[in-house]
Image (cartoon, helix red, strand yellow):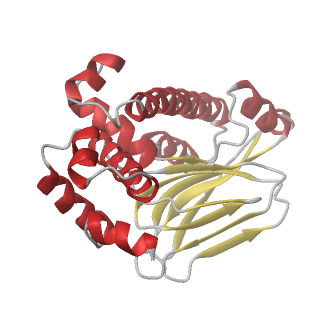
């Protein structure tokens, strides 16, 4: 079985506003692929395991286990599972004019991929309601849908706040290329613990604060080697390395050659 789909019974009155087309579970299938040009259907999905590629309009991303995504109406929707690690996921498809209003109300325009947002319980609640055949449970489904959209909204706010804090940290580190630096300074600057500080920065820039600052120092070292007559020892002191030997070792690891060899090659 590749997919278990549950149709949803609704009275005609509510479907004029929002219609729950279907919900269900997609099981791992290396050939799983969906294409909906200019789709009139919105889709909310939670990925329990596996990975794949999603394209909505000009936006492409690769959600994997633990992520959720929301495909909006009126856009090209194309997605497929990774053949080596196909998705297992839970989903609900919705249509109707209220969908666009909800997207606007929850400030979700342009928001499609929600990393590490677990919507499984909410989607399973909708699936459980759909299984109760012979009864219109769409009012309860609207309540669950509102909860999911609110959680997406809060997730976006947290991401935006994290990005703002990460940018502040980056700007702070940019002032430290010729200064001594202790992680405690950065933690105090944003009022977070060391583990929180590193996590926020790494989520934004895919590196740690220490490695980011080290890369900035090496970039400045290259400029000083190319454009000044400062000795290797003087550059090491200026950039606050412990000594010229440590600086030379780090430089060689990063650039594949010693500072002296880098300067010599640049002048040839």
In percent of width and height, residue 214 lies at 30, 47
The image shows residue 33, relative to residue 210, as above or below, that is below
Side (left or right) of 160 relative to 169: right
Identify which residue is drawn at 50% across, 61% down: 25
Task: Tell me which corner region of the image, top left, top right, bottom left or bottom right, holds residue 225.
Answer: bottom left
Front in this rendered view, residue 215 or 241: 241
Depth check: give the residue in front, 238 or 9: 238
> Which residue shows up at 81% across the image and 58% down it?
39
Q: Could you tell me which residue is drawn at 41 percent across and 67 percent down? A: 50
Please identify the residue farthest to the front as the structure is shown: 229
- Tell me if I can see residue 97 in this picture: yes
Establish if 41 lies above or below 100.
below
Residue 168 in percent (x, y) is at 46, 26
Q: Quadrant of residue 175?
A: top left
Q: Report the side of 24 relative to 208 (left or right).
A: right
Percent coordinates x, y for residue 157 in the rendering: 54, 27
Seen at 51% across and 75% down, the residue is 2
On the image, the x and y values in percent for residue 37 come to 83, 66
Q: Which of 223 and 250 is in front in this view?
A: 223
Give the quarter of the figure containing the C terminus. Answer: bottom left
Is residue 199 or residue 22 the one in the foreground? 199
């Amino acid at each position: 079985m590749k997919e278990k789909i549950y149709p949803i019974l609704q009275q005609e009155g509510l479907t004029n506003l929002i219609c729950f087309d279907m919900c269900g579970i997609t099981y791992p299938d290396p050939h799983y692929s969906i294409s909906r040009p200019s789709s009139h259907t919105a889709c909310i999905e939670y990925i329990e395991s596996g990975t794949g590629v999603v394209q909505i309009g000009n936006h492409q991303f690769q959600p994997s286990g633990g992520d959720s995504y929301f495909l909006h109406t009126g856009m090209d929707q194309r997605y497929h599972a990774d053949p080596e690690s196909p998705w297992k996921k839970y989903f609900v498809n919705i249509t109707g004019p209220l969908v666009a209003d909800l997207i606007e109300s929850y400030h979700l325009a342009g928001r499609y991929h929600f990393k590490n947002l677990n919507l499984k319980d909410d989607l399973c609640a909708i699936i459980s309601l759909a299984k109760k055949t012979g009864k219109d449970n769409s009012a309860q489904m609207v309540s669950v849908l509102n909860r999911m959209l609110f959680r997406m909204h809060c997730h976006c706010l947290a991401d935006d706040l994290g990005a703002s804090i990460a940018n502040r940290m980056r700007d702070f580190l940019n002032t430290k290329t010729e200064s001594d630096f202790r992680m405690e300074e950065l933690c105090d600057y944003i009022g977070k613990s060391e583990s929180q500080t590193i996590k926020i920065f790494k989520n934004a820039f895919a590196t740690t604060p220490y490695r980011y600052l080290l890369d900035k120092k090496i970039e400045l070292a290259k400029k000083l080697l190319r454009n000044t007559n400062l000795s290797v020892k003087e550059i090491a002191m200026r950039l606050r390395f412990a000594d010229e030997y440590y600086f030379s070792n780090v430089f060689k690891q990063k650039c594949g050659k010693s500072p002296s060899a880098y300067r010599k090659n640049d002048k040839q």
